Amino acid sequence: MVAPAKKRHAILELARRAEELKFAGIACPSLGATMGLCVSLAHSTNEIKFWTSIQPIYYSHAIEMANTAAHIHEVSNGRFALGLGVSHGPVIDRLGATTATPLADIKNYLATMKAQERFSGDLPPIYLAALRNKMMHLASEISKPRASSCRCPKSLLLSMPDHAHCARRTQTRSWRHSTCVT
């Protein structure tokens, strides 16, 4: 679900209607103001789950992301999940972001978010976009034990019966994947 300018009230009404119709969830891609939309969804709906798919880490500082994600998680009573990724070259160039390697950037970003958790409150489940084996391996390394039993929103992944199993499998095959890292 995307909330373009001058249509945000209509989009929130659509979300409430999706909830009435018992939709399983709402995926919010990073086409603009995704976190703002998720804050509004937390306040405008009561039962439907929603998540970002996939929020680029270069859009906002990790501390602000942790604060906002924890707020949404709390206000939504745990219905929110945060999908994160490093994006790709054209977006990074457009933003004028200074980057290291994707692996180093996401690792530092997540470490900063987790350090902020003591101030922001509990973070929601975080799903890491992984396109290649090294990123999948990193996701497996940094995930908490409870990740092995989590199920990612269907829009975020191809299949994931168990993150460790998928991480082992993708070390021999290169295919798009996401895994839960919290």
Image (cartoon, rainbow, N blue to C red):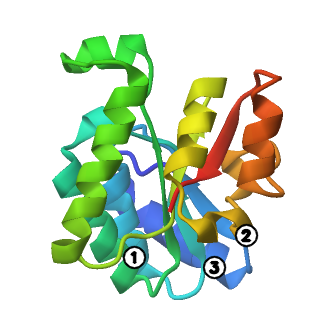
The amino acid on which the numbered mark 3 sits, given as a three-letter code, is Glu
Disc 1 target residue? 73
Disc 2 target residue? 149
Q: What is the number of callouts on the image?
A: 3
Q: Can residue 52 be seen here?
A: no
Residue 19 got which mark? Answer: 3
Residue appearing at x 44%, y 26% in the figure: 87
Among the two numbered marks 3 and 2 on one chain, the one whose residue lies closer to the N terminus: 3
Quarter of the image where one finds residue 161:
bottom right
The amino acid on which the numbered mark 1 sits, given as a three-letter code, is His
The amino acid on which the numbered mark 2 sits, given as a three-letter code, is Ser
State yes or no: discs 3 and 2 in contact (Cβ < 8 Å). no
Residue nearest the observer in this picture, 165 or 175 = 165
Dot 1: element: helix
Quarter of the image where one finds residue 108:
top left
* Disc 3: CA contacts within 10 A as few (<14), some (14-19) or many (>=20): some
Looking at the image, residue 122 sits to the left or right of residue 177; the answer is: left
Among the two numbered marks 1 and 2 on one chain, the one whose residue lies closer to the N terminus: 1
Q: CA distance from mark 1 to mark 2?
A: 19 Å
Indicate the position of residue 92 as horizontal and vertical percent values.
31, 18
